[in-house]
Image (tube, rainbow, N blue to C red):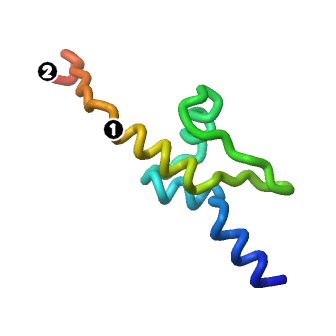
Amino acid sequence: MKERAQTAEKLVWRIEDVKAAIGISSATTIGTWVKERNFPAPKKLGHHLAWKPEEVVAWVDAEMSKPFVRSFSPKLGK
C-alpha cells in the first residue's frame, strides 16, 4: 500500500509543490488566479486539493511564451 501512495504522490502536486514549481510563496495568489480562471483549477482528492503536474507545466509554458510588457508608473520614476 505504501508503494501505491508514493506513486500517487508523484502523479499529483499539492499546493506546496505548485508554489515551489512556479516560484511564488503565496497560496492565496494561486487561489486568486484559479478564481479568475488564470490558472489551472485543482482537483479534489479526498480532503485535499491537487494539481496535475502537466497542467501546471503547460500553464508555465504558455505564460513564458507571452511577450514581456513592462509597465511604467510615472510616480515610481520620481
Residue with the most extreme bottom position: 2
Name the amino acid type tagged 1: Ser
Front position among marks 2 and 1: 1
Q: Position of residue 7 (x, y in %)?
A: 70, 75
Q: Earlier in the sequence, mark 2 or mark 1?
A: 1
Within 10 Å of disc 1 (Cα), the crowding (few <14, some 14-19, many 20+) is: few
Q: Residue at x 63, y 59 (%)?
A: 13
Q: On the image, numbered disc 1 is attached to which residue?
A: 65
Circle on res. 78? 2
Q: Position of residue 29 (x, y in %)?
A: 54, 39
Q: On the rendered structure, is 7 left or right of 19?
A: right
Badge count: 2
Circle on res. 25? none
Which quadrant: the C terminus?
top left
Which quadrant: the N terminus?
bottom right
Q: Position of residue 41 (x, y in %)?
A: 66, 40
Residue with the most extreme top position: 74
Name the amino acid type tagged 2: Lys
Q: Position of residue 16 (x, y in %)?
A: 59, 59
Callout 2: SS: loop
The residue nearer to you, when weighing 22 against 40, is 40
The residue nearer to you, when weighing 2 against 72, is 2
